[in-house]
Each structure stands twice: as C-alpha cells, then as structure tokens.
Image: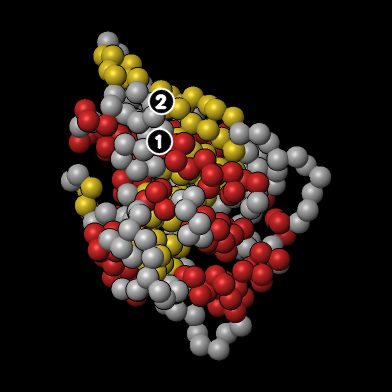
Amino acid sequence: MFSGSRRSLAGRWFAVGLLVATASSPALAQREKEIPEPRDVELTTKDGVRLAATYFGSDREREAGALILLHMFKGSRADYEGLARLLQREHHFAVLTLDLRGHGESIHQSFGEEQRTLSPERLRHEDFEAMVQYDVEEAKRFLIRENNSGQLNIERLGLVGAEMGATIAAYWTFNDWAAPRLTVKQGQDVKALVLISPETRFKAFSIVEPFTSPEMRSEVALYLIAGAGSSRATKGVDQIQSAVKRYHPEPAAGLPADKALAEKTLFVDTGYATSLQGTKMLGEQLGVEERIARFFELRLVKPSIPWAERRSAVP
C-alpha cells in the first residue's frame, strides 16, 4: 500500500511520459472543427427503462475514442460533468454519461402492463443485473449509431466506473468480451477500463469475478484508483491487482519512456492523500481527472485502431 506522501506508480509513469504520449498522437493535431456542445439524450432499454444521458461529442470524428462514465450508488451523471468536459474539450474524446436505472432522472420503467417508479432504495438484485445487461448495452448502442455516422471510433472504447459503477463497468466489460465472434462484430470493443474505489463486493456482486475471464485479465488495460485514507477502497484495488498482475508484465528495463508507456497496461494509483472515494475524488485538485485522461490517451488514442462501420447481426 502506498502512503499519502508518496507518489504512486501510475503517477510516476504518467509524469515521465506525458509529453511524449500526447505530442506524437495524430488525433491531437489542431483542426478547425468546432467542439460540439453537450446534449441531453433519452435512451430506452429493452426492458422499458427510460435512461437520461448526456452526450459530449468530439471534434475528432472517426479518430475519436468513445467513453462511458458510470456513477456511484445514489449518484448521477451530474457527478461526472467536470471530467466529461475535460475529456471532451481538452482531450477530444466522445463521452457519454448516463443515469443508471433508479438514479438521477432514470426513474421510469414501462414494460408491457407493468409501470414502475424506480429509486435506489427499491432496486432489487435483478435491477442491478439489468444495469449491466440493458443500461450499459443501450449506451453502447447509442455510441455505435454515432460510430456509423462517422462521429467516433467504437473500437476505441473505454469505461470509467466509481464504486457501484466500477462493479457495473467490470461486469459489462466481461460481457462485451464474451460476445460471440460472428461474421458481424458484436463485442471485444472495450480496450481500457478505469475503476475508481472499486468495492470488493457490491450487493451480491464480487469485483474479482469478472477478472476470471482470460480476456478481461489480459486484453483490457486497467487503471485502478483509490484514496489512501480508506482501507476498504484500497482492498478492492488490491484484489483486482492480485487477480491480473501476472497477465500485465512490466515493460523491460531500460526502454525509453515512450516505448515503456506504450507497453504498460496496468496502472495502480492508491497514493492520493485523501479519505474521499469514487466520484467524490473529482474536482478536489487531486489530479485524478488529468491522469484518467492521460491513461485513455495512452491506451485508446496512441495505438493504431482503424475505424469500421458496425452493423447488427440481427436483420
């Protein structure tokens, strides 16, 4: 565990490689295109929940990475507004924030004859499963439509999740990589995952279980964040790190900083001198936002990931 006065491993790597990592990326070249204003959108899940979301479009079009940000229990998409604006305006990502069912403005469900008003206190186990199966999946479908209109590259997909959102993000990424490999590509899109203060167990969901998948352990770059003032939060980070670290070898000694960063796929950052956790760490001048942005630039922008139109396997 890192003490509050020491800089974490992720912080040292980012500090060394920032200029190299950002300056060489073609997606960061200056253009005349204006950055779109954020717009609210409503998404309807397959089980009839009306999800409120905000879309921060990119000016990089087919070069743009796509990000989905998932909030904490009893939180809302508003908790990510500052981070979303930074990722969009200074780092040129296309960002979607959404209120998961029962949170924020996503409180109405109509399914057949059933009408429900949802709230965090009334959510059942199956509602949390539905966040994975339906809510995040609907968010991805929205981004695929944006991809097909040339506004982003869905192959450069990343997620941020905080506490409950970290659990939902991990389980949905597991599902994305478990999608069947058909003639029409259906999954394997998430390339990078940021988990802020992941809980060892949220409700009945273990944070380690998704990482039993070989693809989750080795194909998805991870950035694990927690404040040093909470052993509960750092325990979740430790459990994930223990499950995946042998699948993310450290770059060879002596490599130039840019090449070492290009090869590094696991960052662990628990050196923040704060007891704040999850999205409460944002907006506190801890530097969390900028480090998240640099991680996504390293893993989603710098690699060569070509754009492709995506079609559903269902006619």
Tell me the quadrant of the picture where the N terminus can be found.
bottom left
Q: Residue at x 61, y 83 (%)?
A: 256
Where does residue 136 sit, x and y in percent of width and height?
Answer: 41, 38
Residue 89 versus residue 303 in the image, above or below: above
Q: Residue at x 27, y 37 (%)?
A: 128
| Residue pictured at 33% horizontal, 16% vertical | 110
Residue 67 position (above or below residue 244): above
Q: How is the image coloured?
A: secondary structure
Residue 115 visible within the image:
yes
Residue positioned 76% across, 56% down in the render: 29
Mark nearer the N terminus (1 vs 2) = 1
For residue 88, the mark is none
Q: Is residue 29 above or below residue 184?
A: below
The crowding category of the residue bearing disc 1, from other C-alpha atoms within 10 Å (few below 14, some 14 to 19, many at least 20), is: many
Which residue has dot 2 on it?
A: 105
Task: Specify the label residue 76 is tagged with.
Answer: 1
Residue at the limit of the structure toward the left, as seen here: 204
Badge 1 amino acid: Ser
Q: Is residue 147 visible?
A: no
Quarter location, residue 150: top right
Instruction: Give the class, few, some or many, for how many residues have Cα within 10 Å of label 2's Cα (few <14, many ≥20).
Output: some
Q: Amino acid at mark 2?
A: Glu
- Spot occupied by residue 310 in the image (x, y as percentages of width and height): 57, 40
Nearest to the observer: residue 66 or residue 236: 236
Q: Position of residue 196 (x, y in %)?
A: 38, 55
What secondary structure is marked by label 2? loop
Q: Quadrant of residue 48?
A: top left
Evaluate if marks 1 and 2 touch, with contact meaning CB atoms under 8 Å apart. yes
